Amino acid sequence: MSGVSGVNGVTRVDAHHHVWDLGVRDQPWITGQRMAPIRRDFSLADLAPLAREAGIGRTILVQTVPDPAETPEFLALAAGSDLVAGVVGWVDLTGGDVAGALADLPAGPLVGIRHGVQAEPDASWLCRPDVRKGLQAVADAGLVFDLLTLPHQLPAAIETVRALPGLTFVLDHLSKPPIASGELEPWASAVRTLAAEPNTFCKLSGMVTEAPWQDWTAATLRPYAEVVLDAFGPDRVMFGSDWPVCLLAASYAEVVTAAADLTAGLSPGEREAVFGGSAVRAYRL
């Protein structure tokens, strides 16, 4: 890999960010006054200088909406970019022919699939037979599955991870723990149970928007970061900015700085894993 170097000259990776063009496709989840700061277009050209200044050399571009047209667009963006190393796209896991849908995608650096499980009213959605069949097709295609869940959905995630040992799962945003309230349980126990399965990774991402947006500090985030670093180990934890969603609570530079603060007690090799090595191994970049 080439690009901006971090610890020991290894390229640093932002394993989770988005882009969108509201003129091409609406983002219906961006509603209300609080979300207004990000209800505009965000492009790779906007991200590139921010990443460069923060010492990030490669990124993973992640799906935003359940629209099959978005993934080919993202693959095209990645093909024309030196920044994007991989795309986590979307297919309908319940569609009946997930293998065919994946095979029909254009060539490009597709590394994983994600579905917004957090929006599913059924807490056991991941356990549905049709979903499991779709996930098996993702595994058969050699791809990763990003878990976008809320804490109450972790039991179903644990069952699913155990049922599909051949599929690598990456937990997005720590499963969105209640950082604003300061509660750790039952989230922490569930995360530890999930992390005991060897086919799991976790993104150190999305924390600032689960914290109080105006007055969070690294100390606010630290108890949650410590849980995942201890449970998964640094070699299965990867940094993600969640840009531009993070802008609701912090700048890109502030998110990178917070992650550096939260991992300052690790060895150089462990920090290298969090800021690149884990993402490279999980997504086979």
Image (cartoon, rainbow, N blue to C red):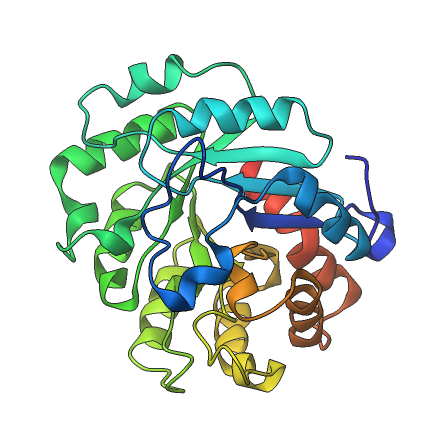
43 relative position to 105: left or right: right
Quadrant the N terminus occupies: top right
> Foreground: 17 or 111?
17
* Residue 226 visible in the snapshot: yes
In the picture shown, does residue 29 fall above or below 173? above
Percent across and percent down for residue 148 are 36, 53
Percent across and percent down for residue 239 are 61, 57
* Residue 285 visible in the snapshot: no
80 relative position to 268: left or right: left
221 relative position to 190: left or right: right
Question: Residue 93's image quarter?
Answer: top left
Residue situated furthest right in the rendering: 9
> Foreground: 203 or 78?
78
In the picture shown, does residue 79 fall above or below 63? above
127 relative position to 248: left or right: left
In the picture shown, does residue 20 fall above or below 5? above
The residue located at (33%, 31%) in the rendering is 67
The residue located at (44%, 28%) in the rendering is 71
Quadrant the C terminus occupies: top right
The residue located at (52%, 29%) in the rendering is 74
> Foreground: 201 or 19?
19
Q: How many marks?
A: 0
Percent across and percent down for residue 279 are 60, 46
Question: Residue 65's image quarter?
Answer: top left
